[in-house]
Amino acid sequence: MKFIVSSGSLLKQLQLIAGVVSTNTVLPILEDFLFDIKDKKLIVFSTDLETSMSSSLDVEANEEGKIAIPAKLLMDILKTLPEQPLTFSINDQNLAIEITSDKGKYRLTGENGDDFPRIPVPEETKEIKLPSSVIANAINKTLFAVGTDDMRPAMTGVNFELTPEGITFVATDAHRLVRYKRLDAKATKATSFIVPKKALQLLGNAIPAEETQVKISYNSSNAFFNFGHVKLICRLIDARFPDYTAVIPTENPNKLTIQSSDLLSSLRRLVVLSNKTTHQATFKMSGSELSINTRDLDFSNEGNETLVCQYDGEDLEIAFNAKFVIDMIASMNEEEVQFEFSTPSRACIMTPLNKKDNEDLLMLVMPIMVNT
Amino acid sequence: MILSPEKTIVHLDLDCFFVAVSRLMNPALNGKPVVVGGNSDRGVVSACSYEARKYGIHSAMPIKLAKRLCPEALIVHGDYEMYTKKSDEVTEIIRDKVPLYEKSSVDEFYMDLTGMDKFFGCYKWATELWHKVKKETGLPSSFGLSVNKTVSKVATDDVKPDNNKKVDRGTEKAYLAPMSVSKIPMVGEKTYQVLRQMGVEKIHTLQQMPVELMRDVLGENGVTIWQKANGIDDSPVIPYSERKSVSSEETFDQDTIDVTKLKSLLITMTEKLALQLRLETKLSSCITVKIRYSNFDTHTMQCRVPYTNCDHHLIPRVKELFDKLYNRRMLIRLVGVRCSHLVGGGYQINLFEDSQEMIRLYQAMDNMRRRYGDNAVQRATGLGFRLRDFNPFNGIRKGVAGAVARNEEPRAKSQEPRAKIQEPGVRNQEPGVKIQEPGSKTSPVGATVW
């Protein structure tokens, strides 16, 4: 088998899908890209068995065939080559791959393309189309709140809730929760599925900056994301997402409004002085002042700052993991943020003060229990 | 002159610390065989004077046996508050004079004197400090001065009591060579047996062995032991060591296989430890359960948990661990719980698992306990038990069972620097404290030991 391809465009496509490739797997072929050539079209696949990606580009080829090529080796060669056409000649008998550039020849050994794991194909799927910006936004706003505890698989992904009224993306790790609703994207039939964190990370990296349509197809076991030349296929998390609607408190008489940038920079300074594991910060609200205190008793470090805010409610003292609050405000990326509290042991809700059209964002963080 | 990278380390150890303090308070004990330990026959010796050692008494030995070996020995009960106080006095003197020191246990100190020889002469300086400690506190001590912690410690143990030893740079290996391998810190009973079975008795033999062999036999520990045998030890003097764990353990008046009782006791201990963690705003992420069978076989098992200080997380794990651990149908003489990997902070409330009511319940119970004492509210299952009463965080007898470990070392005795003060039993792995059970036929001494 032989084909000719531009080094630059090949590298660009490979970089989009290289994130899937795992190192040190039990199955060595997972460290490879699968090159599949049909009708002068090269489709490159990568997979870790949970998530798979593919990307296609046109090549000059007269034959059809498959070969698995070691991913890291190939990428490293391509990265160091200037833009030029490369000739790949593959010996189908001994799987030797010879790449010819205008500088010389590079030989490496591939593996049989037929041994590469089968990539799931969409079957009995339903589909919706979303603008890429909606997906990118949803990933940005929710991904950081996804849990890492494998004992609770449901929380290791973002829940997609599709309804005729809109689409809701929810992520939680049981200590914080983000709910991002889009009212401008609708599905015909109500359904929901949980997409794993890794797939969304890869998707977020691969989605182009310019606006395109992303086609999402899904069935009971897999989700398929298509955009441009790129496809991402992931296995859905087979678990029930916790019923979060019940735990969002509705009665929150204490409300605080503050400039995001002020609070954010305060917290970033104060977190330096907090305990390195718990990042505990105590918020004290009274009048129109918010004082924040962090301390690390083990090293006698302490930080205090007082900020001006708009506070409407009774005096309150409540403690949070400052990192959580920082993550949330940073990802919210709004000028002013509103906090809603009820008691020191109940969830605090954060919302942007100025709601955007077609968008509803709610973030929730659980406090830390303190001695009273 | 450029400061040499080679270090000068002093190891100062107070001689028979508990006995020495007891003697300060009661001079009648001077010159007599003295044993510090629990007062019932099932307690163990937590310290003994050199006079008592002549009779073959050593720490961790049952009091009963010690009495048999030396009927005239004077048995005193520890005054652990006093021990803490005297230990702090010594620390104060050292703090004044030494910029870099490590208090590795209640009666052991490491000091880094690197660079001081330029001005004072380290040995002269250490000797002066040694005299000062004795003069100001009345406590005898011994010190070893050498190039690293291991050699200094071995030297101290070698020359004590009331003595000192300087091991010059370059002579460490020769100095260690004729000693028994059991003198190496880290070599406990089990390791010693392994080495003896290999035919290794003297450190000299160990020095000649290839390090690979030690690795094959004892793993990474073997490498460390080999290095120590060769006088190599680059562990630094750590000025401040964080508290590593809180623990509680109890020996029974009578060995038992009553699983219900054992579990109830473990639950009670865990409850108290969790309370203590909450009062001190600490979280733990590692729980260890320990049991000792009547033949002294001791087993521990631990598990990691997300950072917590709540009863309802810890207790189920403790029960699980106990069920896994207790797999021989044999009498048990001791059970214990330890919470380690501590960090400062409050419990992060869980969105789905914790209810507002539960959090309030904890807060209300803790408030009651703060006001009316630790036993003001407790689980009914623990009502039959009275645990030893002292605060595991400062050693002051106050209200909660437990003991503090400042450091985790694989071996008991001198290698077990965990708060000797707070709990002689921990030092000897055998607290002489009992559970008082209403209606039990055993001696009613129970918790009143303290």
Image (cartoon, coloured by chain):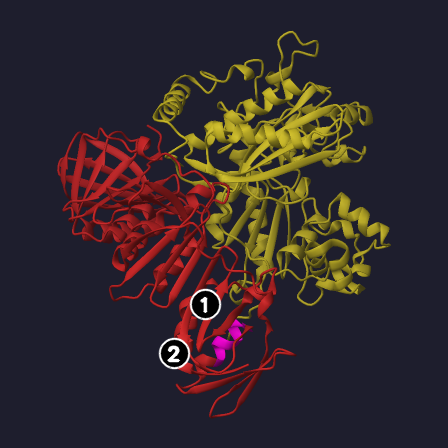
Using the image as rendered, state which of residue B52 and residue A124 is in the foreground: A124
Q: Position of residue B245 (x, y in %)?
A: 53, 38
**What chain is colored red?**
A
Residue stretch rendered in magenta on the structure: A69-77
Q: Colour of chain B?
A: yellow
Crowding around mark 2 (Cα neighbors within 10 Å: few <14, some 14 to 19, many 20+) is some
SS at circle 2 = helix
> Can you see residue B434?
no
Three-letter residue code for mark 2: Ser
Magenta stretch contains residue A71: yes
- Residue A9 is tagged as 2
Which residue ends up furthest to the top in the rendered image? B439
Say whether residue A353 is left or right of residue B313: left
Q: Position of residue A207 (x, y in %)?
A: 33, 63
Q: Quadrant of the N terminus of chain A?
A: bottom right
Residue picked out by circle 1: A18
